[in-house]
Amino acid sequence: MADKPQDQNQSRHQNLEQAEASGKYIRRIRSFVKREGRLTKGQAGALERSWPTMGLEYSSEPLDLKAAFGRQAPTVLEIGFGMGKSLVAMAAAAPEKNFIGIEVHRPGVGACLLEAEAAGVHNLRVYEHDAVEILRDCIADNALHTVQVFFPDPWHKKRHHKRRLIQPELVELIRSKLAVGGVLHLATDWQNYAEHMLEVMQDASGWRNLAADNAYVPRPEDRPLTKFEQRGERLGHGVWDLKFERIS
């Protein structure tokens, strides 16, 4: 007779516990939903042409930044760059810096590479992988100049707040990857999420709020104004930027 669903669930739970006890790595449910989507011809072509030079593969060893970019320069890392338009614009505007983007949505990666090709950007590298694993395994401690997270999923329903990306554990991980004096730049168009971000950062140790009022900073000029933001401004929607400097 086949196992009942309750028996099957109990068996899976026991197997998970046994695997963890033996030291095996178990993939956990993530705080994002990976939507593969369909690549356009342009995105697919950009992936084929530019991934060999601009794509970075996950590794359990820290990335050699000098080898990846062919130089030593201040490095900016963006988590969740979407379709990559603003990331490419920032890289084009600051050729003296290295930029790394992380995104799990493959069409977004393809769109970013296509945009980079059109802009003639060469100081950008991208990962198609989970950001937490990249930070944990691929980025050396004290290696980054800036980490930026712009408009992450707000998970606006209260019961989903635990899925929000900006949580104490991630903030502490980011702090370890920034050099002292490095900056974490966050932005959101959801006031409740902005308040959540501010609370998390205020409770975290080793940071200094760069806002004059210890709350939010005006939109920095180096963060491109997106079409989405422009439309939001016309409709009276707010956007909140936070900048915190690592001090220890």
Image (cartoon, rainbow, N blue to C red):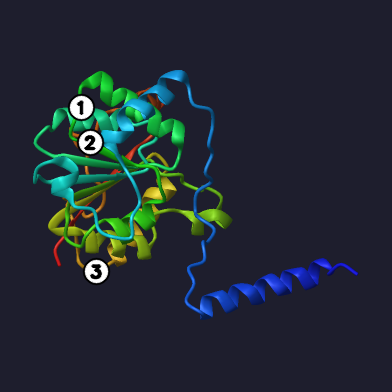
At 50% from the left edge and 49% from the top edge, which residue is drawn?
Answer: 32
Q: CB atoms at circles 2 and 1 under 8 Å apart?
A: yes
Quadrant location of the C terminus?
bottom left
How many numbered discs?
Answer: 3
At 81% from the left edge and 66% from the top edge, which residue is drawn?
Answer: 5
Q: Secondary structure at mark 3?
A: loop
- The mark that comes first in sequence, 3 or 1, is 1
Amino acid identity at mark 3: Ser
In this rendering, position of residue 9 left or right of residue 50: right
Can see residue 29? yes
Q: Which residue is mark 2?
A: 124
Q: Which residue is mark 1?
A: 121
User: Residue 231, image x and y in percent?
Assistant: 39, 23
In this rendering, position of residue 205 left or right of residue 134: left
Residue 87 versus residue 205 in the image, above or below: above
Q: Residue 241 or 8: which is nearer the viewer?
A: 8
Tag on residue 205? 3
